[in-house]
Amino acid sequence: MSEAQQRENEPVSILLVDDEENILRALQRLLMDEEGIEIATATSGEEGLKLLPSLANLGLIVSDQRMPGMTGALFLEKARDINPDASRIILTGYADVTAAVDAINKGGAWRYIAKPWNDDELVRVIREGLERYRIIIENRRLNTLVLKQNQELDEWNSNLKQRVLSQTTEIRKKNDELHDVNRQVKNAFNEIISAFSELLNLRDQRFRSHGRNVSDLACNAALVMQLSAGDIETIRIAGLLHDIGELGIPENILVMEREMMTAEEAHIYQTHPVRGQAALDAVEQLRPAGILIRHHHERWDGGGFPDRLVGDSIPMGARILACADSIDRIMSRDHTEHALAAAIARIELESEHALDPELIKIFRSTASKTYPLRDTSQKLVERELQPVALHLGMRLARDIISGTGLLLLGHGEELDEARIASISRYYRIDPPGHGVFVLVER
C-alpha cells in the first residue's frame, strides 16, 4: 500500500499552537464535532516543533502570531521544513500586517485569520485547509499512477493503440482535477492580495479604497493599450499593493504634504518604493509587480525617486500606475464629474514633467469607468436602509465600512445578489452601527 493510500485510510491530525490555554480549549470545542480528525495542542512554538515528528498524517497547523519566545511566523517557517505538505494558518490581529506578510512569505502560510475570529468562518477555512492537504496527497498518488501507466504503455507495445484509447478518459479526468487545484490556489492567492490591499487602506482613512481604485484605473488603461494578459495581471497586483512599502514609515510623515517635508523626512518617505519591492521579493510570482512598485514614483523628466529614471526607461506599468495614483488622490475627495475633470486637468499639467504625456489621452477616456460619478441632477436622493430592504440595481451613496473600519464596498457600486448577500453577512459579523446608504428616486 502506498504512502498516499495509507494516509487516506487514517485520521488527519491538526496541531493547534497558542500560549493561551483558553484559546486552545475554544478551538478544540469548535472542532469537537468534526469527523476523521485528531487534535494535538502546544502552548509554544518550541513545544509545537517537538510534537511535529510524532504526529501521523498531519494535515493542518493553526498557530497564533503573538507568543512568548518564538513568533507564529517563525514557528510556521520551521514547521514547513518538517511537514511541507500540511496547510498552515496564522491567527493575527489587524495591527499585525507585517507579521502576516512574514507568515505568508517566509512561513508559507496558506491563509491568515483575524482575531477575534468568526466561528463559522474559521471552521470553513479549517475544512478547506484539510481538503487542500488531501488534494496534495491525492495528486501525489495520481502522479505516481500516471507514471506507472506510462511505464505499462511502454511495456505493452503489442496493443498500444487500444490501451492508449482506454486510458485517455482517465488521464483527461486527472488533468481536470489538477486544473481545479491550480484554480483554487490562484483564487486563494488573489484573495490574499485583495485582503492585504484592504489592510493597507486602513492606515489612512482618507484613502479607504485607494489601492483598489489605482488598480482599476491602471488596468482599464492597460486594456485600451492592448497590453498582454500577463502584463495587465502584474499591473493589477502592483496597483493593489503599491503602497505596501509605507508600512513602518511614521504616520506623521505619511500625512504630510511632500513640499512641507524636511530633507530627512523626504528621505524616509522616498524609501517606501524600495521597501515595497523588498517586501514582495520573497514571493517569486510577485517580483514583476515589485519592479513596478519600485518605480511608480519616478518622473518623466528624471526628477523622481528612487532611481531617477527618465522617460521610456521607466517601465510602462510604473508609468501607468503613476498616472492612476495621481488621479485617485484627487478623486478620493469627491466623486463628481467636476472632480474628475479637475483630476484630468491636473495630470495634463504634470505631463512632460512628471507623467508620460502619451498616457494622458488614454486616462481621459478611461477614468470615468473606475468612478461611478455622483448624480448632481438632484433626481436621486440618499436614503438609509437596512440590509433586508436592499434591492437589485440600487447604487451605494456612501462607502460601506465595517464596525472595525474595514472597507466592504465603495460608494457608487451597483448592488447585485452577491453584493447584497455579502452586506447582510458582514452586518451580522461586524455591524457598523447604521444602515446602508443608497441612492433612490425622489
Image: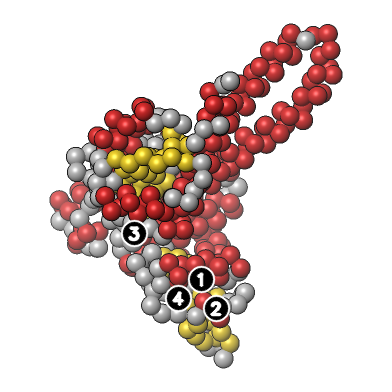
Q: Position of residue 404 (x, y in %)?
A: 34, 67
* Residue appearing at x 60%, y 77% in the figure: 391
Q: Which residue is the site of mark 4? A: 398
> 104 or 213: nearer the eye?
104
Residue 360 visible? The answer is no
Q: Nearer the viewer, mark 2 or mark 4?
A: 2
**Looking at the picture, which amino acid does disc 4 mark?**
Arg
Cα separation between marks 2 and 4: 18 Å
Look at the picture and state if 23 lies above or below 84: below
As helix, strand or loop, the secondary structure at mark 3 comes to loop
Q: Position of residue 44 (x, y in %)?
A: 25, 40
Density class for disc 3 (Cα within 10 Å; few <14, some 14-19, many ≥20) is: few
Cα separation between marks 1 and 2: 7 Å
Tag 2–tag 4 contact (CB < 8 Å): no
Density class for disc 2 (Cα within 10 Å; few <14, some 14-19, many ≥20) is: few
Q: Position of residue 332 (x, y in %)?
A: 39, 68
As helix, strand or loop, the secondary structure at mark 4 comes to loop
Name the quadrant of the C terminus: bottom right
Q: Earlier in the sequence, mark 2 or mark 3?
A: 3
Cα separation between marks 1 and 4: 16 Å
Tag 1–tag 2 contact (CB < 8 Å): yes
* Residue appearing at x 36%, y 28% in the figure: 54
Q: Earlier in the sequence, mark 2 or mark 4?
A: 2
